Amino acid sequence: MSRLNNGDQFPALELPAVGGGTISLPGDLAGYYGVVLIYRGSWCPYCNAQLAAFSRAADALNDLGVKVVAFSVDDAETTAALVSKRKLSFPVGHSADADKIAAVTDAYVSEEPHYLQSTGFVLAPDGTVRLAVYSSGAIGRLVADDVIGFIRYIKEHPDLR
């Protein structure tokens, strides 16, 4: 698999969600602009900052019709504690299989310990990729304010949709 590019269909993924149920991608985001955040784990300070920033931006994202989901390889208990601590207002998945996710998204994987590096996608309402950000290490990730500006720009310029 090569990296996902603009216009590619986002692959089908199923992840257990904090609080029960399943996150189904891209289906759960269908009809909306979507943000998919793959974060390294609850131990990562950069990931914590990113997730908290997206939660703080919830009103602006909602006003634009944007849904956000996030997930990592962390287990259910660890992820639930992160959601509570950071007051995350969007669905968060847990127990992701790093190798399976990497196989369909080509996200970078750390081997020791085994986890996915930060990877983010902005999806169009039809589930196609509009923007992909792949990081091979601790920094380099989607920023909430940039996503808000990007989606505003797309909506103001229908010829770019």
Image (cartoon, helix red, strand yellow):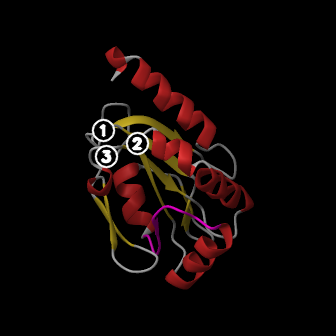
Residues at discs 1 and 3 in contact (Cβ within 8 Å) = yes
Q: Which residue is mark 1?
A: 128
- The kind of residue on which mark 1 rests is Thr
Q: Real-space Cα distance between discs 1 and 2?
A: 16 Å
Q: Quadrant of residue 91?
A: bottom left
Point out the tag, 2 or 3, that comes first from the N-terminus.
3
Residue under the point 64% across and 53% down: 56
Separation of residues labelled 1 and 3 (CA atoms): 6 Å
Residue at screen point 58% across, 53% down? 118
Q: Position of residue 70 (x, y in %)?
A: 49, 60
Percent of width and height locating residue 59: 55, 48
Residue beneath the point at 74% across and 61% down: 45
Q: Is residue 116 left or right of residue 51?
A: left
Q: Which residue in the rendered view is the most extreme toward the right?
A: 45
> What are the residue bounds of the magenta stretch?
87-96
Q: Which residue is mark 2?
A: 65
Magenta stretch: helix, strand or loop mostly: loop
Residue occupied by mark 3: 10
Q: Single out the mark in the foreground, 2 or 3.
A: 2
Q: Residues within 10 Å of mark 2 (few under 14, many from 20)?
A: some
- Reply yes or no: does residue 92 show up in magenta: yes
Image location (x, y in percent) of residue 160? 36, 18
Say which amino acid is labelled 3.
Answer: Phe
Instruction: Please identify the quarter of the rendering in which residue 5 is found.
Output: top left
Query: Which quadrant is home to the C terminus?
Result: top left
